[in-house]
Image (spheres, grey):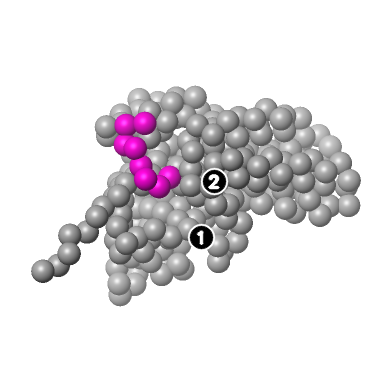
Amino acid sequence: MTPIKKWKKWMAVGCSHGDQIDPEARKAVLTFKERWKPDTTFHLGDFLDLAAFRSGAVSDPNSSDRAASVSDDLSAGIDFLHELRPQHILFGNHEARLYKLAASPNALAAHASTLTIQAIEETAKKLKARLYPYHIRSYAELGGTKFLHGYMFNVQAIRDHAEAFGSDIVMAHLHRVGSERARTLDGSTGHCTGMLARFDMEYASTRRATLAWSQGFAYGHYCDTALTVNLCERKSGHPWLLPL
Ligand SMILES: [Fe+2]
């Protein structure tokens, strides 16, 4: 007789972007977490926005991002992590800026980056969470599915990640909720959680692609060898409708 699998519950969010988080999205995912009670929770990266650390902001003296508050961003991002209590925290391309600048000859930027990295590491320690660097070979895994932030950015990026990683994947990065099939013999599927950031973030104001953004999160069941994926999506101008 086949042994009965013991299923557990998981959930994943991504792209909350520090103080750019949408308060409604924040409330929705924390409410869902309270109701769903997952055994495993992921933050898939971009938990900080770090606009002032953007290379354009560093090099352009007139960039408005130079004035983006590092402390507001850091405290909002850390605060959200404390409330979400993920066991797995992945760095996204926004946190990756810190590691570039930590080695900068600009002593002020290097010091600010190092202090921010320390604050993230202390938070992870308090939460007993594992941190994953922003590196294509660094990902979390649960029930045979890989969890990552994301690297490619194109209209078929969800499919491309599933094909590149050779398994089912759950990612963030693209700021749109969706699922796409991989063109592989084992029939993998990619899923994107969408974002939790505000639809009207400053850098979205003139980019057509951002009109396709949606907020959301992913959740499901898992055992040692399998994992199910459900997505909850909220489009701009729509209310949050939680599945629980
Ligand atoms: Fe993001």
- Using the image, determine if residue 152 lies above or below residue 41: below
Q: Image point 39% across, 58% down: which residue?
A: 142
Label 1 and label 2: CA atoms lie apart by: 17 Å
Residue identified by numbered label 2: 128
Q: Quadrant of the N terminus?
A: bottom left
Mark closer to the chain start, 1 or 2: 2
Left or right placement of residue 136 versus residue 7 in this view: right
Amino acid, disc 1: Tyr
Q: Is residue 168 magenta?
A: no
Q: Image point 86% across, 41% down: which residue?
A: 108
Left or right placement of residue 53 versus residue 174 in this view: right
Residue 225: give x, y in percent of width and height.
30, 64
- Using the image, determine if residue 210 lies above or below residue 138: above
User: Which mark is drawn over residue 164?
Assistant: none
Residue 204: give x, y in percent of width and height.
57, 36
Front one among 51 and 90 = 90
Front one among 132 and 60 = 132
User: Which mark is drawn over residue 139?
Assistant: 1
Is there a contact, CB below 8 Å, between mark 1 and mark 2? no
- Using the image, determine if residue 185 lies above or below residue 27: below
Q: Image point 67% across, 27% down: which residue?
A: 72
Residue that lies at the very extreme toward the bottom in this rendered image: 185
Q: Quadrant of the C terminus?
A: top left
Amino acid, disc 2: Lys
Q: Image point 35% across, 25% down: which residue?
A: 239
Front one among 186 and 5 = 5
Residue that lies at the very extreme toward the left in this rendered image: 1
Front one among 154 and 133 = 133
Instruction: Write the start and end of the magenta stretch as one range.
Output: 34-41
